[in-house]
Amino acid sequence: MTAEATGTGWKADWQPVVDAVGQDFSDGETTWGADPVEHGAIRRYLEPLEFDCPLHTDRDVALRAGFDDVTMPYTGLMSWTLPPMWRPGETLFDGDDRDAQPVRSAINNQDMPLGPRTTGFFGTDIEVEFLRPVVAGERIGRRGRRLVSCAPKETAVGRGAFLTWESEIVTEPGEVVARIRIGTYAYVPKGTAGEGEEGT
């Protein structure tokens, strides 16, 4: 039986991505968060969580603990490293469909230069190694986008691949404050014309 007859030929389309494991797709650039970490944003971040820790809210306590200012909650790492979704003069949504997706997003794989074109995407897991707390006044970003693994797999939602990406979280002077690994699943949804169905 051929790969096409068994419905596994689609996996060959992912081989260039599998072969690229270890490659950095960032072109050496750092993607900066939209804004520096600041007191008001930390407070707004903490409010819905009712997360009461004086290291995040009381500058004097943070100074006595040896920090230069209040610290960003570790759980806010993603919030402060994402670039802006929208800028004045830009269009974020170009349609009014119920499930309309943004024209551009920092958390999908639209810029993936290898492998098959996918239209479905979601995060599967995240792992962070924190090296030191980030304090108010610092701006952080993600440096590097190294592909750590690629595992093609058909799931209940479609055919695609589980991908793991690794980046460093850095300050503007270049100090590494954390390392992050993000797992994703990029796929073609089942039922999409000619994709994700048996024998295609």
Image (cartoon, rainbow, N blue to C red):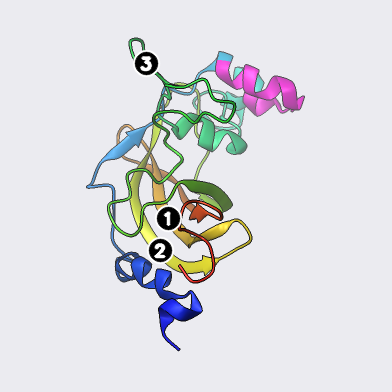
Could you tell me the amino acid type at mark 3? Arg
To which residue does mark 2 refer?
148
Q: Residue at x 61, y 33 (%)?
A: 73
Percent x, y of residue 114: 29, 57
Nearest to viewer (mark 2 / mark 3): 3
Q: Residue furthest left?
A: 27
To which residue does mark 3 refer?
87
* Dominant SS type (magenta): helix
To which residue does mark 1 refer?
165
How far separated are the C-alphas under marks 1 and 2? 6 Å
Percent x, y of residue 96: 52, 20
Nearer to me, 31 or 4? 4
Percent x, y of residue 24: 29, 56
How far separated are the C-alphas under marks 3 and 1? 26 Å
Could you tell me the amino acid type at mark 1? Trp
Instruction: Identify the image quadrant of residue 97.
Output: top right
